[in-house]
Image (cartoon, helix red, strand yellow):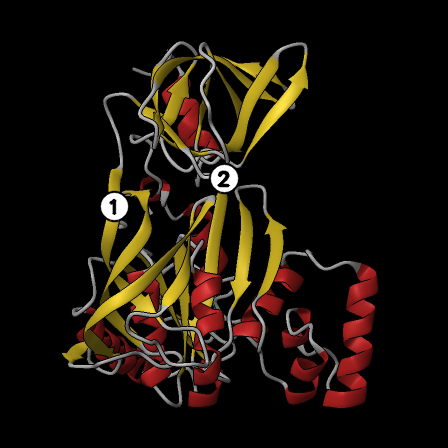
């Protein structure tokens, strides 16, 4: 049981005040422009950066300000006018702090998109109003769903280029709905916008009086995503052991999920040995309890041999110790998957060797259908079976992301 008042503290300090969201969609749908508009209109761009952007815009783009330059940081991105790398931007309003992940739209950079979306709690899917739902729209939506994202905003962009047509918007909503029915149970908010003109980004658009929903920023400030983090199952992967002198020994790391209190009984994996939490140490002082995603140092009542890659959990709530696995896979290597070849499997703070024994099927992102496959190539998505040389401590992804 939580200490009195601690449940509300946990709630306030989770995703209520911090929202991580990833933009996704096809190339040229306007993802970078939208992020630039959000940052510009919320006054989250430094003056010196803004001056550089305006100068580059006038020199190379023949316009006063190109909002996409706020996130397109690589030289090759600026010159081509596309996003290649994953860009992270931070801004805040009086209601919430935000971490934005700007992911690339080109198919050859799908692996970058998957990496960027892996830590997001919300997916902002952009669709060009002129083109409607295309293959990359479906691919990115599917990957976001596979990564456990359950909150979606589908922003139909460039409405100014279709005369702010309600019919165009509703047709795209119907088309996307038909596809999203094949995904997991997502919450979807549809909004028509023009990132370039600012319609429905910060303020409600006078050009689309037929849309009665909230502007984008208002929705992002108020959307409830607190259920996305597991606060039940305590999981603490040990990052390193801190020998602080004077017989101090603490185990440092970031709480992956759950809540832990001083005095609670815990079990260390893989040894299985048990102890109690004697201290919860942080930079700001000792705590009576801590919760995900806090970075803390845990001290135990007993001297136990613990090292990086071990996991601390509550004695009566343990993860699965898995020597084999079945998982959805987004293949990110330019070399195709080789059945039986040893790969390094990174999981929390541990790295183990493992191999793929079988590809069960490959997914077609166009309609989420399954087709037989012997291996996966770059950017392909499938489900496979694998064997691990050393067991890992894991939960089902849908229950503990």
For mark 1, give the secondary structure: strand
Please state which of the two labelled residues, at mark 2 or mark 1, is closer to the viewer: 1
Residue at 44% in and 41% down: 15
Question: Disc count in the image?
Answer: 2
Position of 51 relative to 266 (above/below): below
Name the residue: 37% across, 73% down. 331
Q: Is residue 140 left or right of residue 280?
A: left
Q: Circle 1: is it few (<14), some (14-19), or many (20+) Cα within 10 Å?
A: some
- The answer to which of 175 and 145 lies nearer the viewer is 145
Q: Quadrant of residue 169?
A: bottom left
Name the residue nearer the viewer: 206 or 257.
257
Residue drawn 46% across the image and 81% down it: 334
Mark 2 or mark 1: name the one nearer the start of the chain: 2
Q: Which mark is residue 17?
A: 2
Q: In the image, 153: left or right of 69? A: left
User: Residue 235 appears in which quarter of the rendering?
Assistant: top left
Across and down, in percent, residue 250 comes to: 56, 21
**Figure check: 134 above or below 154:** below
* Disc 2/disc 1 C-alpha distance (Å): 35 Å
- Whether residue 4 sits left or right of residue 309 in the image: it is left
Q: Which residue is mark 1?
A: 322
x, y (%) of residue 356? 28, 66
User: Does residue 121 sit above or below 166 in this rendering?
Assistant: above
Residue 212 in sight here = no
Task: Report x, y in % for residue 256.
Answer: 41, 38
Task: Estimate the x, y position of residue 255 in percent, counting from the top left.
Answer: 45, 33
Where the N terminus falls, by quadrant? top left
Front-most of residues 368 and 278: 278
**Residue at the spot x=77%, y=67% of the render?**
50
Helix, strand or loop under label 2: loop
Q: Residues within 10 Å of mark 2 (few under 14, many from 20)?
A: some
Q: Which mark is residue 306?
A: none
């Amino acid at each position: 049981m939580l200490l009195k008042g601690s449940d509300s503290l946990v709630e306030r300090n989770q995703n209520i005040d911090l929202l991580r969201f990833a933009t996704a969609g096809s190339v040229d749908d306007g993802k970078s422009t939208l992020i630039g508009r959000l940052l510009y209109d919320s006054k989250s761009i430094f003056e010196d950066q803004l001056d550089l952007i305006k100068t580059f815009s006038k020199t190379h783009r023949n316009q006063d300000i190109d909002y996409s330059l706020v996130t397109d940081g690589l030289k090759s991105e600026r010159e081509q006018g596309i996003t290649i790398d994953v860009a992270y931007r931070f801004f805040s309003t009086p209601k919430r702090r935000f971490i934005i992940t700007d992911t690339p739209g080109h198919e050859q950079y799908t692996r970058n998109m998957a990496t960027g979306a892996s830590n997001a709690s919300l997916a902002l899917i952009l669709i060009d109003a002129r083109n409607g739902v295309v293959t990359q729209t479906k691919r990115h939506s599917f990957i976001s769903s596979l990564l456990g994202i359950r909150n979606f905003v589908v922003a139909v962009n460039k409405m100014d280029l279709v005369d702010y047509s309600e019919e165009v918007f509703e047709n795209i909503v119907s088309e996307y709905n038909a596809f999203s029915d094949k995904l997991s149970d997502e919450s979807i908010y549809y909004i028509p916008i023009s990132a370039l003109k600012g319609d429905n980004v910060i303020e409600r658009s006078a050009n689309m009086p037929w849309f009665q929903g909230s502007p984008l920023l208002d929705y992002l400030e108020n959307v409830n995503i607190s259920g996305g983090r597991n606060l039940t199952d305590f999981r603490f992967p040990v990052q390193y052991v801190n020998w602080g002198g004077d017989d101090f020994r603490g185990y440092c790391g970031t709480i992956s999920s759950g809540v832990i209190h001083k005095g609670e009984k815990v079990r260390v994996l893989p040894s299985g040995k048990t102890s109690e939490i004697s201290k919860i140490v942080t930079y700001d002082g000792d705590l009576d309890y801590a919760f995900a995603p806090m970075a803390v140092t845990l001290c135990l009542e007993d001297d136990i041999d613990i090292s990086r890659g071990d996991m601390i959990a509550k004695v009566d709530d343990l993860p699965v110790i898995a020597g084999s696995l079945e998982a959805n896979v987004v293949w990110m290597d330019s070399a195709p998957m080789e059945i039986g070849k040893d790969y390094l499997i990174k999981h929390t703070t541990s790295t183990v060797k493992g191999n793929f024994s079988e590809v069960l099927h490959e997914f077609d992102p166009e309609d989420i259908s399954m087709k037989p496959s012997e291996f996966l190539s770059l950017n392909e998505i499938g489900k496979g079976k694998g064997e691990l040389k050393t067991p890992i401590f894991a939960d089902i992804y849908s229950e503990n992301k």
